[in-house]
Image (spheres, rainbow, N blue to C red):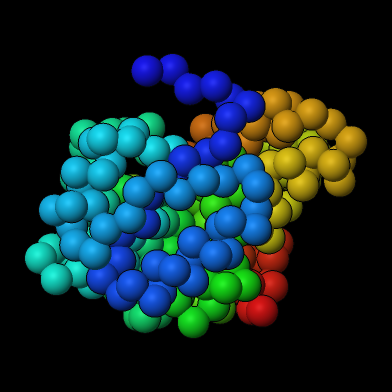
Amino acid sequence: MNKDPASKKSIVIIDDHPLFREGLKSIIARARHFEVVGEAGDARRGLEDVKKNNPDLVIVDISLPDKSGIEVARAIRSRYPGTRIIIVSMHSKIDYIVEAFQAGATGYIVKESASDRLILGLETVLNGEYFLDSSISHAVVEKLLKEPLKETRVEDADYGSLTPREQEVMRLLAEGFAVREIAEKLYISPKTVENHRSNLMRKLGLRSAIELARYAARLGLIDVDLWKD
């Protein structure tokens, strides 16, 4: 079923704490372009709601009574690849975060900051980008910078192969700016930014935003302190 792009974005919430679900619904209700179409307190009923409503986005707790939110994310990613997924969790440990994104999540928010970060997270992932709660971003980047790049060799010559505009876009992406924000800063269209991003990622042999941030930090193009609150 095709959805009207102008209609409200539909959301299903899967969390076993009723008060937390009510809090999320209250926040979402204040943003008129979102609509909660289903909610559940466990994975089984949550996946039934996803099947029934075909939502644009699912918010799922990492800890559920019957399955983990990681397993739910994998199931949604497999069955409904167009649905975006935000994991909410009490945990800010990097291992949880990495596993969540590997399972198919497109966003990760720590519960204690959900009231402040939720709407931005929804808007970001529904815009086709990834969202990582800024309260944990610095720690994640610090750990990733200590790990060797896999199947990717960082060379200054690769960076030199980029055009000046691609270098500019790369730096802004690495600093965490969204595509639309970069477009506004550089007075170009979001589509042009997307084209530059695709070209520079191909030239550098990078496959993700995290690899891009690590590459830029290793070349001294950004400071990891920029990822702090």
Residue 221 in the image, given as x and y percentages of width and height: 70, 62
- Residue 59 showing in the rendered view: yes
Q: Is residue 62 left or right of residue 195?
A: left
Query: Who's the residue at 20% across and 69% down the image?
Result: 64
Which residue is outermost to the left?
A: 66
Residue 92 located left or right of residue 100: right
Q: Nearer the viewer, residue 145 or 4?
A: 4
Judged left or right of residue 95, residue 171 is right
Residue at 69% across / 42% down in the picture? Answer: 179
227 and 38: which one is in front? 38
In the rendered image, which quarter is residue 71 located in? bottom left
Residue 25 to residue 48: above or below: below
Residue 164 picture location, percent across and down? 80, 38
**Residue at x 23% of width, y 52% of height:** 46
Nearer to me, 219 or 4:
4
Residue reaching furthest to the right: 187
